[in-house]
Image (tube, rainbow, N blue to C red):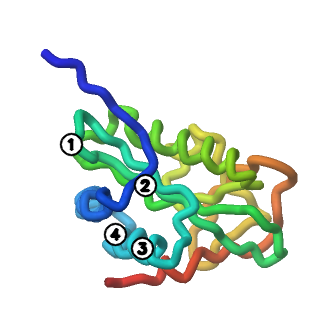
């Protein structure tokens, strides 16, 4: 049996179709989704707002993707980003692919000089990377436990977070 090699790398223009397919497949049967994640990634890319966009490749096949884009905080704190969407094909989930993608996105954000990162997602999963719900940082309309932050440098800001307008993409 051949050893399979997982590679985490920056996306290339040739990856865009596969990223869309992986994202659609990942969220097809997921709870708490409106099935627009692939459109969000496309809109972020078109707006030049994909600050970090990584793919997971296994023996030449793209099986995962993770993105980060700038967010605005109402108190004016700069250099904060939102993690997501994070996608891994269902057949490859629960094997560490998503964890490797998230860790690399956070490393890349640190290299960009990011002050912090927020994520909307499962607390038990993202808590493993240091994310936690913070009462001073909110995403309106979202249960507080599912909106989490990770300070990378400096102090935790206080305010309301808004994602890039690309997160409103529906097609």
- At x 47%, y 83%, the residue is 168
For label 1, the crowd category at 10 Å Cα-Cα, with few meaning under 14, some 14 to 19 and many 20 or more, is few
Pointer 1 with pointer 4, Cβ within 8 A: no
Sooner in the amino-acid sequence: mark 3 or mark 1: 3
Pointer 3 with pointer 4, Cβ within 8 A: yes
Q: Mark 4 highlights which residue? A: 38
- Relative placement, left or right, of 92 versus 104 is left
Q: Mark 2 highlights which residue? A: 86
Exactly how many numbered labels are in the figure?
A: 4
Kindly indicate the quadrant of the structure image that contains residue 16: bottom left
Q: Mark 3 highlights which residue? A: 40
For label 3, the crowd category at 10 Å Cα-Cα, with few meaning under 14, some 14 to 19 and many 20 or more, is many
The image shows residue 78 at horizontal and vertical percentages of 79, 67
Pointer 2 with pointer 1, Cβ within 8 A: no
Q: Is residue 38 above or below residue 18?
A: below
For label 2, the crowd category at 10 Å Cα-Cα, with few meaning under 14, some 14 to 19 and many 20 or more, is many
Sooner in the amino-acid sequence: mark 4 or mark 2: 4
Question: Spatial distance from mark 4 to mark 2, Cα to Cα?
Answer: 11 Å
Farthest front residue in view: 13
Along the viewing direction, whichever of 92 and 34 lies nearer the viewer: 92
């Amino acid at each position: 049996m051949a050893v399979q090699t997982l590679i985490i790398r920056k996306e290339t223009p040739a990856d865009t179709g596969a990223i869309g397919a992986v994202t659609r497949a990942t969220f097809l049967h997921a709870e708490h989704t409106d099935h627009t994640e692939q459109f969000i990634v496309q809109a972020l890319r078109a707006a030049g707002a994909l600050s970090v966009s990584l793919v997971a490749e296994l023996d030449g096949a793209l099986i995962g993707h993770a993105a980060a884009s700038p967010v605005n905080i109402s108190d004016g704190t700069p250099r904060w980003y939102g993690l997501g969407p994070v996608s891994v094909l269902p057949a490859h989930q629960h094997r560490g692919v998503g964890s490797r993608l998230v860790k690399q996105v956070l490393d890349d954000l640190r290299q960009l000089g990011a002050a912090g990162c927020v994520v909307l997602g499962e607390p038990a999963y993202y808590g493993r990377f240091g994310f936690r719900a913070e009462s001073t940082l909110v995403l309106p309309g979202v249960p507080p436990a599912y909106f989490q932050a990770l300070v990378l440098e400096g102090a935790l800001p206080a305010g309301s977070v808004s994602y890039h307008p690309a997160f409103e993409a529906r097609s």
